[in-house]
C-alpha cells in the first residue's frame, strides 16, 4: 500500500480468538472487537500467521482453548 494509505496488516498485529476458538489477526494498537480476546502473541504479519499455524487446526480453530478469567480484577 502507499504511505498515504498504509495497510493495517503492515504494522504490529496481535493474535485474537473468539468464543468458538477461531483465531484471527488484529492491529496491536486497537482494542479488540466485541467477543474477541487476546491470545497473548504480538508480531509482524508473517510471525502472527505462523503462530496461528502452531496453535490452530487447518480451520484456524484453536487446538486447546485458553482459560479466560470471567471476572478480571
Image: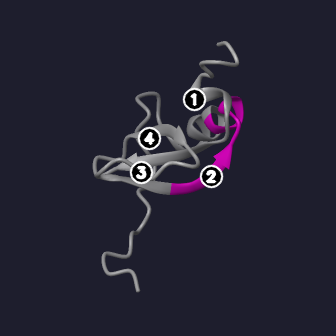
Q: Does the magenta portion include 12?
A: no
- Mark 1 or 3 closer to N-term? 1
Question: What residue did someone put label 3 on?
Answer: 32
Secondary structure of the residue carrying tag 4 is: strand
Instruction: Point out the stretch of residues depicted in magenta.
Output: 39-48
Q: Residue 11's spot in the image, x, y percent?
A: 67, 35
Looking at the image, is mark 4 or mark 1 nearer the viewer?
1
Camera-side residue of 52 and 48? 48
Task: Determine the residue located farthest toward the front in the rendered image.
Answer: 4
Task: Determine the residue located farthest toward the top in the rendered image.
Answer: 2
Question: What residue did someone put label 1 on?
Answer: 8
Q: CA distance from mark 1 to mark 3?
A: 14 Å
Q: Are marks 4 and 1 in contact (CB under 8 Å)?
A: no
Q: CA distance from mark 4 to mark 1?
A: 17 Å
- Mark 2 or 4 closer to N-term? 4
Rendered image: mark on residue 23? 4
Q: Residue 14's spot in the image, x, y percent?
A: 58, 46
Q: Residue 25's spot in the image, x, y percent?
A: 51, 37
Secondary structure of the residue carrying tag 2 is: strand
From this view, report whether residue 61 is shown above or below residue 38. Answer: above
- Left or right of 27 on screen, residue 46: right
Amino acid at each position: 500500500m502507499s504511505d498515504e494509505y498504509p495497510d493495517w496488516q503492515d504494522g504490529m498485529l496481535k493474535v485474537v480468538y473468539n468464543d468458538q476458538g477461531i483465531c484471527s489477526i488484529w492491529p496491536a494498537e486497537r482494542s479488540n472487537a466485541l467477543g474477541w480476546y487476546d491470545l497473548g502473541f504480538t508480531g509482524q504479519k508473517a510471525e502472527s500467521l505462523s503462530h496461528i499455524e502452531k496453535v490452530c487446526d487447518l480451520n484456524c480453530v484453536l487446538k486447546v482453548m485458553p482459560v479466560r478469567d470471567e471476572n478480571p480484577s
